[in-house]
Image (spheres, rainbow, N blue to C red):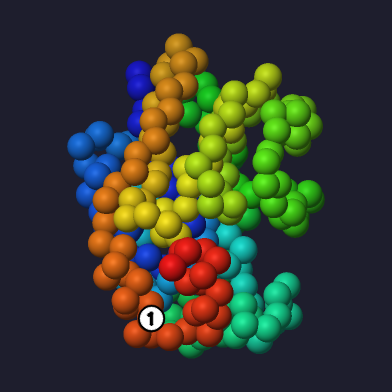
Amino acid sequence: MTMKIAVISDIHGNYEALEKVIGDMEQFRIDEVYCLGDMISLGHQTNEVLSVLSEMENLTLITGNHDDEVIKALKGMKSQVSGPEHEHHLWVSRHIDPDYIHMLENLPLTIEKRIEGHKMLLTHYHLDGCRYRSIEESPSLELLEEIYGQEAYSVVLYGHDHITRHFKTSGPVVVNPGALGVTETSFAPYAILELKGDGAINTMFRNVPYDRRKFIEGLKNENPPALDFIMKFLLKE
């Protein structure tokens, strides 16, 4: 038996990109979809994104740092960030539909899956205990083997650094599908894993065209806090 799993991450409130990626999945007969966190924040289409995700029957969700910070802002809890970034999370929390709050505040930090004999880890980023490690700009096989070498995972899926990556370590296959919603081009990335009963793991990366200009103009019109940073450093506008 073969299972096909679509892996998405870091949608960041970009409904324009998410809609096109979901449409692209239809041609592949996907069995399950895994979303690795950061569904919201940075982009302005919070409720549109959460509406789509909440209606997907074959979806597994975990939290990301931005999702967590928005919930903290909503509840008046202490934040891990400050300044314009915190103001941005407060802005998102004020615009979120209350119907989606319960879903966000109950998301797990990680999930383990067992499919076709494969043990898989879903995490937003590599953890040190219950905290995310600092982002490694150039992660090495040695580092990943140090983190996951003692675990019996076949596959580790993560996001957070917004870069598409694929490693075959001495232990698990480690995959980052890229940031679906924070792109410098008009293409939204995601990954498809094909897990076979004989132990084979095949990985395909997709880049799906979407109306990036419509997303950019909509974000500018909303004018959230930290817009200049988002445009210059994340979207490279």
Where the N terminus falls, by quadrant?
top left
* 120 to the left or right of 185: right
Residue 92 x %, y %? 49, 81
Residue 159 x %, y %? 55, 49
Residue found at x 22% / y 42%: 26
Tell me: residue 29, above or below residue 227: above
Question: Is residue 99 visible from the viewing direction of this image?
Answer: no
Residue sitting nearer the eye, 14 or 120: 14
Residue found at x 64% / y 49%: 125
Residue found at x 49% / y 57%: 10
Residue at the far top in the pictured view: 198
Residue 31, quarter of the rendered image: top left
* 58 to the left or right of 200: left
Residue sitting nearer the eye, 59 or 178: 178
Which residue position is annotated with label 1? 220
The amino acid sitting under disc 1 is Lys
Question: Is residue 66 visible from the viewing direction of this image?
Answer: yes
